[in-house]
Image (cartoon, rainbow, N blue to C red):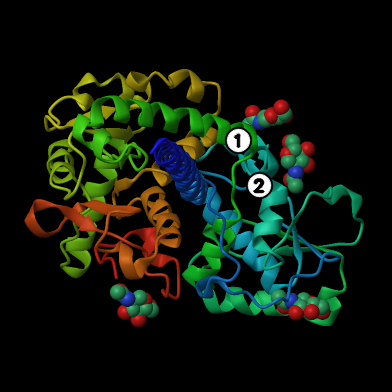
């Protein structure tokens, strides 16, 4: 009896031991599973985050496959200083680089212009390309498609100067013929071809949108400017996580929540309103076409508030001309669930004001590019370039319905009083609709 009992006790003890052992093993297993899954989720989120913020083109992506050809790095092209607005300068730079490609020559690093003077060219402050964009990233991302060299043009003696004509008689065909001529063996033998004349933004457009897109992809801000962009973006995101999360959402998906913001490139300054009214009138007079270019502040506010799927509340960044920062009315009249900010209210004016016009504009461009939702004017080249860039980043098959990288044109009314959904037609054969604007925008 005693023995039985003790053996029973022994059994029980043994049984308990095994149970505890199993239990501990299970707990350990469960715990490591939790740790592992959390690690994976975090790693995944980090990857998504990285993919989103430091997007670089996927070399295997079929849309951007480039045959390995490359341009010669012992023949060069020199171009005049690049001038006017950020968007004009980006287009000019792409035209210069693509002209280099056409001539199979490396572009000598051009000067951009830090200031915005249209007429007084002596006031244009030259700003080396590599003060704004990383030269190294440009050449590695463009991967030989086009190339820029930092060599000094003065170190070459064998320079052929070619005057590029302008004016009405200078047709695209003539321009192309001249470029072809530069490829004849006599002209091609010169180490440097120096193109003179009106600045490259006014050169003819001989290239499809996809070629421009490849060059634009290479334009990555230098590190210290990317840091400034991150400061502005994280300020917007911190505001949006303070006002934008309802507690339920935190409980349901603590890891998945990503603060979002909307960016609106609002063109309502006086100069623009005069300019856009003129364009509308001219189009009506010339070909009876009613273009929708101008939108009042009220129209913009209304259309933005009708965008489907916005977080309530939503932080809205207003990218506006500096003159408008003094206008307090800019921030008034927005729907209750929209919290509008411009540089001043956001408290980032000091970040911008350290820099000349071109760099301020480049920071704003990036802030709009990184927004979850972008709303712009389809007749603004600045807006159009942002939409082109966002279109390159989205998976169009899925995203025209979804909300990732969504862009809208506020000057065109879509269904239910919304602004029109907008993505660039990447198969367009020229940059015309980006450069001159269009009402024919869609997302397909
Ligand atoms: C440039 O010239 C090199 C060498 O002649 C050639 O291999 C390459 O394909 C050419 N590239 C272009 C873009 O024409
Ligand atoms: C760019 O501007 C600087 C300063 O004015 C000048 O020294 C340099 O030669 C210019 N570079 C080119 C390629 O025009
Ligand atoms: C970025 O930093 C470098 C080195 O610190 C400096 O030379 C350069 O001028 C800065 N760029 C701008 C645009 O301020
Ligand atoms: C995109 O551009 C191509 C080439 O110009 C044209 O054939 C096509 O219809 C355009 N697509 C849309 C949706 O506008």
Looking at the rendered structure, the secondary structure element under dot 1 is: loop
Query: Which residue is found at the position 15% from the left and 67% from the top?
Result: 288
Residue underneath mark 1: 124
The response on whether ligand 2 sits within 8 Å of label 2 is: yes
Residue 404 falls left or right of residue 178: left
- Which image quarter is the N terminus in? top left
Q: Is residue 192 above or below residue 17?
A: below
In the image, 133 versus 153, the foreground residue is: 133
- Which image quarter is the C terminus in? bottom left
Pinpoint residue 96: horizontal percent, then vertical percent.
64, 60
Pinpoint residue 205: horizontal percent, then vertical percent.
51, 68
Query: Which circle marks residue 81 in the picture?
Result: 2
* Mark found first going from the N terminus, 1 or 2: 2
Q: Do we see residue 112 in this rendering?
A: yes
Q: Is residue 387 above or below residue 223?
A: below
Q: Are marks 1 and 2 in contact (CB under 8 Å)?
A: yes
Pinpoint residue 378: horizontal percent, then vertical percent.
30, 55
Query: Which residue is found at the position 20% from the left and 57% from the top?
Result: 420
Q: Rounded to the nearest whole Å, what is the CA distance between mark 1 and mark 2? A: 9 Å
Q: Which image quarter has ligand 4?
A: bottom left
Residue 37 falls left or right of residue 164: left
Query: How many numbered callouts?
Result: 2
Query: Which circle marks residue 210 in the picture?
Result: none
* Mark 2 Cα shell of 10 Å, populated few (<14), some (14-19), many (≥20): many
In the image, 55 versus 297, the foreground residue is: 55
Query: Which residue is found at the position 59% from the left and 73% from the top?
Result: 175
* Mark 1 Cα shell of 10 Å, populated few (<14), some (14-19), many (≥20): some
Residue 62 falls left or right of residue 341: right
Looking at the rendered structure, the secondary structure element under dot 2 is: loop
Residue 276 falls left or right of residue 73: left
């Amino acid at each position: 009896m005693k023995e039985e009992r003790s053996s029973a006790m022994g059994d029980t003890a043994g049984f308990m031991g095994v149970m505890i052992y199993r239990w501990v093993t299970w707990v350990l297993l469960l715990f490591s599973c939790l740790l592992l899954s959390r690690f994976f989720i975090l790693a995944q989120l980090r990857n998504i985050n990285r993919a989103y913020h430091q997007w670089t083109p996927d070399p295997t992506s079929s849309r951007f496959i480039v045959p390995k050809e490359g341009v010669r790095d012992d023949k060069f092209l020199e171009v005049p200083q690049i001038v006017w607005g950020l968007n004009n300068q980006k287009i000019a730079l792409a035209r210069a680089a693509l002209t280099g490609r056409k001539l199979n020559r490396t572009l000598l690093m051009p000067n951009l212009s830090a200031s915005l003077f249209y007429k007084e060219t002596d006031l244009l402050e030259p700003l080396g390309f590599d003060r704004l964009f990383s030269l190294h990233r440009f050449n590695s991302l463009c991967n030989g498609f086009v190339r820029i060299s930092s060599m000094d043009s003065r170190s070459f003696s064998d320079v052929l100067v070619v005057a590029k004509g302008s004016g009405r008689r200078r047709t695209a065909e003539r321009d192309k013929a001249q470029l072809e001529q530069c490829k004849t063996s006599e002209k091609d033998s010169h180490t440097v071809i120096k193109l003179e004349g009106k600045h490259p933004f006014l050169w003819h457009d001989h290239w499809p949108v996809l070629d421009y897109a490849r060059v634009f992809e290479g334009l990555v801000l230098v590190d210290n400017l990317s840091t400034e962009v991150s400061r502005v973006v994280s300020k917007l995101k911190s505001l949006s996580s303070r006002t934008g999360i309802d507690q339920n959402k935190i409980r349901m998906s603590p890891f998945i929540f990503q603060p979002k913001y909307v960016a609106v490139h609002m063109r309502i300054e006086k100069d623009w309103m005069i300019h856009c009214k003129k364009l509308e009138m001219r189009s009506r007079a010339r070909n009876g076409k009613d273009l929708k270019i101008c939108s009042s502040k009220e129209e913009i506010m209304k259309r933005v508030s009708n965008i489907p799927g916005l977080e309530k509340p939503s932080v809205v960044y207003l990218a506006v001309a500096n003159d408008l920062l003094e206008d307090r009315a800019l921030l008034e009249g927005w729907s209750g669930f929209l919290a509008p900010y411009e540089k001043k209210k956001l408290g980032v004016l000091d970040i911008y004001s350290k820099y000349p016009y071109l760099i301020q504009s480049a920071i704003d461009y990036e802030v709009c590019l990184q927004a979850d939702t972008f709303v712009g004017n389809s007749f603004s080249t600045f807006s159009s370039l942002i939409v082109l860039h966002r279109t390159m980043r989205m998976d169009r098959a899925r995203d025209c319905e979804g909300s990732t990288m969504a862009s809208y044109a506020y000057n065109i009314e879509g269904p239910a009083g919304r602004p029109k959904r907008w993505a660039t037609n990447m198969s367009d054969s020229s940059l015309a609709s980006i450069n001159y604007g269009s009402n024919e925008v869609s997302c397909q």
